[in-house]
């Protein structure tokens, strides 16, 4: 049976946090062990340039995110783990696809429409501050996916539209130039946890409410102690289902531990004790990976070697495939 190709992109902005871990990294690494899948994971540093113009931040984030995935056990012998910018065929494919993409399709992209609406609400010109990276990045994302003919693309619900756009672009290219691209499918796992942050909103770098994954022990404890709670006293029953502390606990705990903590909430556990136990649970799970992470950061050459190995494996697919696509569109030697 032909293996399914599964592709996951990781944007290189910011430091990985607990929400990234339970929502994307942990399930992706588990899926990479599935022998029926051929998994591709890439650091989306071209995408990072859309919103971040700080070169050092882009570079540092690439280092930290690569170290995170490796420290958490991604087996690069079983998967293709690469840096987007190392695959020189991707920008060229982006242009080939751009020439097959209707402007109207890009006009309907959620991120672009949201930016336009925000400008209008502020009394600005509709396109104020919007660069072509933001406008056309669904085409770059399509190139990421179609370059390796990925069958499945795990995404959050907010990214489903981009997979549908990639399908539309691929179908139009196939119609003009023959059947070259598989039509990708979005995979949305409704069981994957979406963690709340320190303030009770979704944990997100844009809200500044994250708990970085590999904080040193003292700082991890300090961050967990900052989680917003209500004023209920020790001994007063607490609602587990509306508690950020419990929600994060549930993402890391076994079913038995979850049931025990739910009962503790009903029995009126003190917030300080609940946070203490949460710290111990998380610290126990990330402690060994934290040590590997710090060792990798101290030896960036080891990370670079892994990425170069991944780029070589990725380009074994992308280089011959782009040569076929160039031939298909008529870009070839005259004689």
Image (cartoon, grey):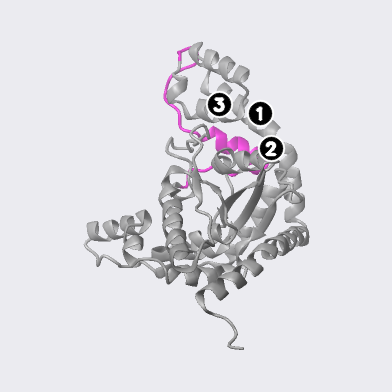
- Of circles 3 and 1, the one toward us is 3
Q: Which residue is mark 2?
A: 286
Q: Residue at x 55, y 26 (%)?
A: 250
Range drawn in magenta: 208-237
Mark 1 surroundings within 10 Å by alpha-carbon count, few (fewer than 14), some (14 through 19), many (20 or more):
few
- Please identify the dominant SS of the magenta region: loop
Mark 3 touches mark 1? (CB < 8 Å): no
Q: Residue at x 29, y 60 (%)?
A: 116
Mark 2 surroundings within 10 Å by alpha-carbon count, few (fewer than 14), some (14 through 19), many (20 or more):
some
Is 201 in front, or is 174? 174
Screen quadrant of the N terminus: top right
Confirm whether residue 211 shows in the render: no
Point out which mark residue 250 bears. Answer: 3
Is 280 in front, or is 94? 94
- Of circles 2 and 1, the one toward us is 2
* Residue 149 shown left or right of residue 304 in the figure: left
Give the CA separation, mark 3 to mark 1: 14 Å
Confirm whether residue 121 shows in the render: yes
Residue 60 point in image, percent of width and height: 62, 60
Q: Which residue is mark 1?
A: 280
């Amino acid at each position: 049976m032909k293996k399914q190709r599964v592709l996951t992109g990781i944007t290189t902005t910011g430091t990985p946090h607990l929400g990234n871990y339970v929502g994307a990294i942990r399930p992706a690494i588990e899926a990479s062990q599935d022998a029926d899948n051929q998994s591709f994971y890439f650091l989306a540093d071209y995408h990072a340039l859309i919103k971040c113009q700080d070169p050092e931040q882009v570079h540092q984030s690439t280092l930290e995110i690569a170290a995170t995935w490796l420290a958490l056990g991604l087996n690069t012998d079983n998967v293709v783990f690469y840096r987007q910018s190392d695959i020189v065929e991707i920008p060229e494919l982006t242009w080939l696809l751009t020439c097959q993409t209707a402007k109207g399709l890009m006009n309907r992209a959620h991120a672009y429409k949201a930016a336009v609406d925000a400008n209008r609400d502020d009394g600005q010109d509709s396109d104020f501050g919007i660069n072509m990276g933001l406008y056309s990045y669904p085409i770059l994302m399509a190139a990421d996916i179609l370059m390796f003919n990925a069958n499945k693309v795990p995404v959050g619900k907010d990214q489903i539209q981009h997979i549908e756009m990639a399908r539309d672009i691929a179908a139009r290219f196939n119609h003009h130039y023959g059947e070259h691209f598989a039509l990708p499918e979005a995979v949305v796992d409704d069981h994957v946890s979406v963690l709340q942050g320190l303030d009770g909103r979704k944990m997100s770098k844009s809200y500044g409410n994250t708990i970085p994954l590999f904080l040193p022990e003292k700082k991890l404890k300090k961050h967990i102690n900052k989680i917003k709670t209500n004023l209920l006293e020790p001994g007063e029953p607490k609602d587990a289902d509306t508690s950020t502390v419990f929600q994060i606990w549930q993402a890391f705990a076994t079913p038995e531990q979850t049931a025990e903590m739910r009962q503790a909430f009903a029995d009126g556990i003190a917030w300080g004790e609940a946070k203490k136990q949460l710290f111990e649970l998380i610290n126990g799970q990330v402690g060994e990976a934290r040590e590997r992470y710090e060792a990798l950061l101290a030896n960036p050459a080891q990370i670079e070697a892994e990425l170069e190995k991944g780029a070589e494996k990725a380009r074994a697919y992308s280089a011959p495939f782009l040569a076929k696509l160039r031939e298909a569109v008529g870009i070839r030697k005259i004689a």
